[in-house]
Image: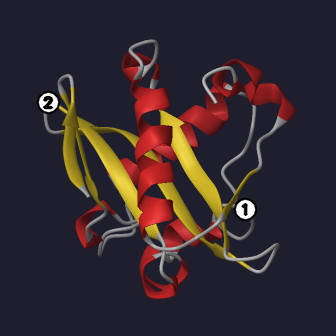
Amino acid sequence: MRTAYKNFLIRNWEKSDGFANAKGERTPASEVIRSVLSEYGLGWEPNGADRDVLQVQECYLATGGEFWVIEHQNQIVGTAAYYPIHRGEKAVEIRKMYLLPSARGLGLGKYLLQKLEEAIASRGFQQIWIETKERVSRSRQTV
């Protein structure tokens, strides 16, 4: 994936976007996720629900999924991803769709969802699952 929407670049995840660098410091993609979770009063769970962000290569890329980052002026301001799941038939789950406040209200969420659906269909998947927390109700309005 490499496309533009307004002044945003949507591209495939790269190793440098991963959770921790050699010093164990957080990198921009995981910081976006942590920040948005915190905004909604939710915790970052590196040993639980967010473990897949620590293992993008294994959990997404190696399984037939994708993990994208969204940039604005060379800064990561969002993420969006999906991977195959064993639920239903030829099913995937859309995950880690987060945008910082500066990237919201511009139609980017709808555009990302459309691009995710196109990518998923092009790989032959037939069902899409999305799970969200009740606290994130405003973001669900775009879906």
What residue occupies the far top of the structure in this picture?
105
At a point 52% along the width and 74% down the height, the residue shown is 124
Q: Quadrant of residue 92?
A: bottom right
Q: Quadrant of the N terminus?
A: bottom left
What residue occupies the far left of the structure in this picture?
73
Under circle 2, the secondary element is loop
Under circle 1, the secondary element is loop
Q: Position of residue 97 (x, y in %)?
A: 54, 44
Q: Is residue 118 above or below residue 100?
A: below
Q: Is 140 on the left-hand or right-hand side of 98?
A: right
Q: Quadrant of residue 22?
A: bottom left
At a point 39% along the width and 67% down the height, the residue shown is 20
Front residue of 113/24: it is 113
Is tag 1's residue or tag 2's residue first in the polypeptide sequence?
Answer: 1
Q: Are marks 1 and 2 in contact (CB under 8 Å)?
A: no
Q: Is residue 36 above or below residue 138?
A: below
At a point 64% along the width and 25% down the height, the residue shown is 139
Count numbered badges in the picture: 2
Residue beneath disc 2? 73
